[in-house]
Amino acid sequence: MTNSFLALFCALPVTLSVVPASAAAADAPPAFMLAGGRTALVVTDPQNDFLDPKGVAYGLFADNLKELNAIGNMERLFKSAKLVGMPVLVSPHGYFPTDHAWENPGALQKQLLSLNIFGRKDAVYASDLNGSGADFLARYKPYILDGKTVVTSPHKVYGPHSNDLVLQLRSRGVDTVVLAGLAANLCTDSHLRELVENGFKVVVVKDAVGAPGADAYKAAVVNYGFIANAVWTTDEAVKAMGRY
């Protein structure tokens, strides 16, 4: 099952050589400033099933996470945002028992549901969340569970259309987002697209994401270059956040 899950993630080959040089324009350190008081950090799916060695899908991401130092880089973003008082929002994945009754989920959704990735038993009291695959990675909890970070309702597919992320951002006067998280080529990519479609300026931090393999990561970064307002490294993002 895990092998078929990986195959679905990486089904389409990526031919980087056909991408015009202009597509990488956003990849250079841009003359792009984070709007003071109007910028938020958004992290998608910083959860055990992707990030903890015991997680169901961790093996698919392990090499890419290690190569990028993504787990450490995401923590640097959390820490930097907290130091300067930047709003932090987390958009997690989650599936409840009733979600298994979907009539016709997509191919990858079928795999997620059958493997019980981000599976929850309790949609009301969250009594099953602590320590589960849907829980947050332990090293991030001091930043996420500080009473200030906004944890949105779970998104169900890839983007934030099915949760309250856009509402939470708009309600705080946010118009610029620093985006990181997992999976780079799916949920992070879909959040980027949805936020841009809703009029937000988005910076993606390309080494604070994780993908199920090199091809999936390359595909994500190519798309970031086309869609995002800027694509930064963690070093560049932390420096910019320091001027927030």
Image (spheres, rainbow, N blue to C red):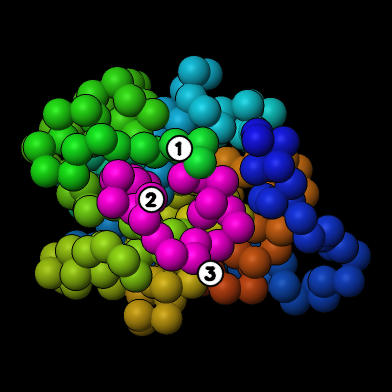
Could you tell which of marks 1 and 2 lies nearer the N-terminus? 2
The answer to whether residue 239 shows anywhere in this view is no
- Local SS, label 1: loop
Which residue was labeled with disc 2?
100
Quarter in which the C terminus is drawn: bottom left
- Is the residue 143 above or below the residue 180 in the image? above
Q: From the top left corner, tell me how far across and down residue 215 is, in percent.
A: 77, 49
Residue type, mark 1 in image? Ile
Res. 194 image quadrant: bottom left
From this viewpoint, which residue is outermost toward the right?
17
Residue type, mark 2 in image? His
Using residue 190 as the reference point, say whether residue 153 is left or right of it.
left
Q: Disc 1 vs disc 2: which is toward the camera?
A: 2
Q: Disc 1 vs disc 3: which is toward the camera?
A: 1
Res. 39 image quadrant: bottom left
Q: Disc 2 vs disc 3: which is toward the camera?
A: 2
From this viewpoint, which residue is outermost toward the top?
54
Residue type, mark 3 in image? Ala
- Local SS, label 3: loop
**Which residue is located at x 51 percent, y 36 percent?**
115
Could you tell which of marks 2 and 3 lies nearer the N-terminus? 2
User: Over which residues does the magenta segment extend?
Assistant: 90-113
Q: Marks 2 and 3, Cα distance to the nearest angstrom? A: 34 Å
Which residue was labeled with disc 1?
117
- Local SS, label 2: helix
Q: From the top left corner, tell me how far across and down residue 54 is, in percent.
A: 49, 18
Q: Marks 1 and 2, Cα distance to the nearest angstrom? A: 12 Å
Q: From the top left corner, tell me how far across and down residue 157 is, in percent.
A: 43, 59
Residue 78 part of the magenta segment: no
Q: From the top left corner, tell me how far across and down residue 139 is, in percent.
A: 34, 21
Could you tell which of marks 1 and 3 lies nearer the N-terminus? 1
Which labelled disc corresponds to residue 228? 3
